[in-house]
Image (cartoon, rainbow, N blue to C red):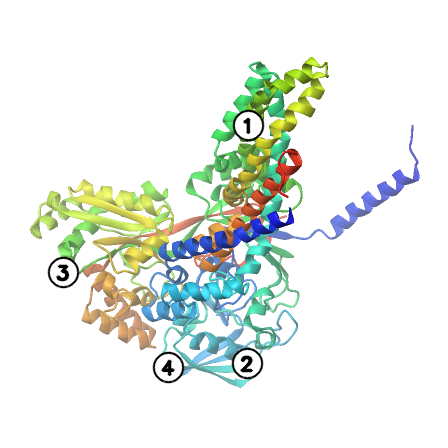
Amino acid sequence: MTTRHPLVRTLAAALLGALLLGFASAEREIVIAQGVDVTGFDPHGHHTTAVEAVHVNLFDYLIFRNADGDLEPALAVAWEPIAEDAWRFELREGVVWHDGAPFTGEDVKFTLERVASDSSLQPFDSYRQIREVEVVGPHEIIIHTHGPEPLMLNRISRLSSGIVPKHVVEEIGWEGFDEAPIGTGPYRFVEWRRDDRIILEAFDDHWRGRPAFDRVVHRTIPEDSTRVAELITGGVHIAPNVPPQDVERVLASGAVAVEQQPTTRIMLLIMNTHEDAITGDPRIREAIELAIDNQLLVDAVMGGLGVPTRARLSPGISGSPMELFGTYNYDPERAVELIREAGYEPSDITIKVEGPAGRYPLDVEQAEVIALMLQQIGVNTEMEVLEWSAFQSRIWNADNITHFALMGLANSMFDNWFSMRAIQCEAAYRNRVHWCNERFDELMALAETEVDLDKRTEYLHEATYLVVEERPWIPLFQIEVLVGVSTDVDWQPRQDELLWMFAAQPVD
Amino acid sequence: MTAYILRRLLQMVPVVLGITLIVFVLVRVSGDPVALLLPEDAEQYQIDALREALGLDQPITTQYLIYMRDLLRGDLGTSIRYSGQDALPIVLERLPATLQLTFAALLVAVVISFPLGIIAAVYRNRWPDVSATSFAVLGQAMPNFWLGIMMILLFAVILGWLPVSGRSGLASFILPAITLGTSLAALLTRLMRSSLLEVLNQDYVRTATAKGLQRRLVLLKHAVRNALLSYVTVLGLQVATLMAGAVVTEQVFAWPGIGLLAIQAINSRDMAVIQGVVIVAALIVMSANLLVDLLYALIDPRISYS
């Protein structure tokens, strides 16, 4: 029996039409899942890698760091220092904003002068060196600084460096901009559903060319196991921070590869070197360093995800003596000797291990293993691990470190001066470490304004070795994170943890 | 009736005020949002500048007075996490997602517990009763965090029938609603069973049976209706528990409701948003309680508010 009822035929035709339409408009979409949502779209309204990881697709920098860590032209095509305190930039011509208006030097002036002058903006500290942006022509600007500024290129190529359109912000204000941001990046803003998803679509007129994917969806999935499940079922193509214990399960699905992504974050022990504390004795600090087996810590706690280091540096950080990376000192016998030389028996002393819980990957476990390692040389230990915000207010900002605190510090400036700036005599860590070395400060002051990069590197190397010898902090290892990437996508994670989707290609 | 409702609505005002005070103080003594916004090695002047910009440099009493003044104008303050946006719209735009989920969970709970409780009571101590009671014990013993993850594993990852997470389409409701509704279903099953058993032993039921009424009629018309009173009471009171459960469920399923908002806001000490969520949640719970009281009058004609 054949049915030729008109309704059936209509329905069949409609179904076929819908199918054909579906194929014709098949969009290439890539879905990314992070644990936290963006806080808005004002590039100066945050200081967070996870937020910048999304922003970077909407806004262009003047200079962009490529996946290898090298600086390459973006909105600026050429640059040169023209005086000790001035840099000239030639801007790219023919760049348009997502609303079609042309990009000019006025936009750069508007953007940089705002963040350089408002101290309540979170990234202010990295831009306050800028005195004025002079617009010489529509595509030429000069950035004047308060003094010699060797880090100028690092400053304008890091998080929060996205350039915003003057005409749009002046028209709709920063609050309006947060709801409907406009940039020059490869993707344009479509929709933001808070704590759910951000939808971006390819910008046809982007100066690098049209990106390979038509749509980028950034989803917020706070729960690790849910993110992993989405990855396995193909609901998500890229997900940073795959928990090490889930790697096997993820790989078993056959649809996902797990990439190891080194970061600039170094786990370290911030020491209280005040003479009233037992850690005020340099021999005790050295003993603590020698008692810790950094590689074992990485293997036992982090599942091998990390590289031991003796200084707060990692590949790609300018001015770094790299011979200190990938190495560590472990000598428990010498540690015991040092404690005896300081006039104690190991069992006489009690060291307090302090740290935050839930701030860094497996931070509590790290603190526990460090305490265990100290116990191995006969030292007594006490532990205090607090939820991050409580740790901040009771220990960290209260300058209440008893002996040492476990911290993890990232380096978005990709520079060794930036790494060490906080331990100068009068800087942020003054009352935390109580360490003051005049020669170190002198070297840091020289490096801060030295534009001859070879000389600057020399100063920074010497300063780094002073820190390594005197141990106001004891670096442990560089954190590596795991990123799940679907086999349908060709994309490599970056050391700065940005989710730069222009580089993503579909695998057919 | 109207007077009663008005009186109840007025009573909500001091409760909300009390709640704002408690939350205001708790949020401020438990951590510093400025420290969470800035990097670990931020300079003191930056911390000070941001604190001033957020108004946190004022004494806590001044902060509270400013907060109350704004609250009376319907202004809950601005979000710290969502750089300077008004807190109220942020909370309200998330409300539908949570209400839908809560309602779906309530539906799941009623659809399971109502028949199951009746069957358990009618077949007391026989296998349907044992099965229903086992479900009730199991359902209440499973933390919904664990249940959610297990359901994702089974129905989304292994069987591939349902989406893992997110809020897009009807299918995405199924797993979170069952996760959130199961423990309530378990509680209500037990409750329905015990109150029905109690009613079934009453004289008027025996009388109705003696009069020769059909067993089905006796059960549904006389017994169940009277057993409903405690069922509805607990159902209404459990709205608060459901809202609390939604916090965990939304986290597991990346469900963009006020529960997820609450967790993210607490993690970043986003004071205005935390306060907004608590006030809105309190209003919902109080309204649910009021609704239950009004429902009594419908179920039990002996109760009247006039």
How far from the left and from the top, in percent, is residue B249? Answer: 53, 42
Numbered circle sitting on residue A225: none
Residue B95 percent coordinates (x, y): 59, 51
Q: Residue at x 28, y 56 (%)?
A: A395
Helix, strand or loop at disc 4?
loop
Choose the circle earlier in sequence order: 4 or 2.
2
Q: Nearer the viewer, mark 3 or mark 2?
A: 3
Q: Disc 4 and disc 3: Cα gap in Å?
A: 37 Å
- Name which residue type carries label 2: Glu
Q: Residues within 10 Å of mark 4 (few under 14, many from 20)?
A: few
Q: Can I make out residue A159 in this image? A: no
| Label of residue A275 in the image | 3
Q: Residues within 10 Å of mark 2 (few under 14, many from 20)?
A: many
Q: Are marks 4 and 2 on the same chain?
A: yes
Q: Which residue is mark 4?
A: A146
The label nearer to you, 1 versus 4, is 1
Q: Specify which label sits upstream in the sequence, 4 or 3.
A: 4
Residue type at mark 4: give it.
His
Indicate the secondary structure of the residue bearing disc 3. loop
Secondary structure at numbered mark 1: helix
Residue with the mark numbered 1: B191
Between A413 and B137, the residue placed more toward the observer is: B137
* Mark 2, residue position: A106
Image coordinates for residue A482, horizontal then vertical, percent: 44, 47
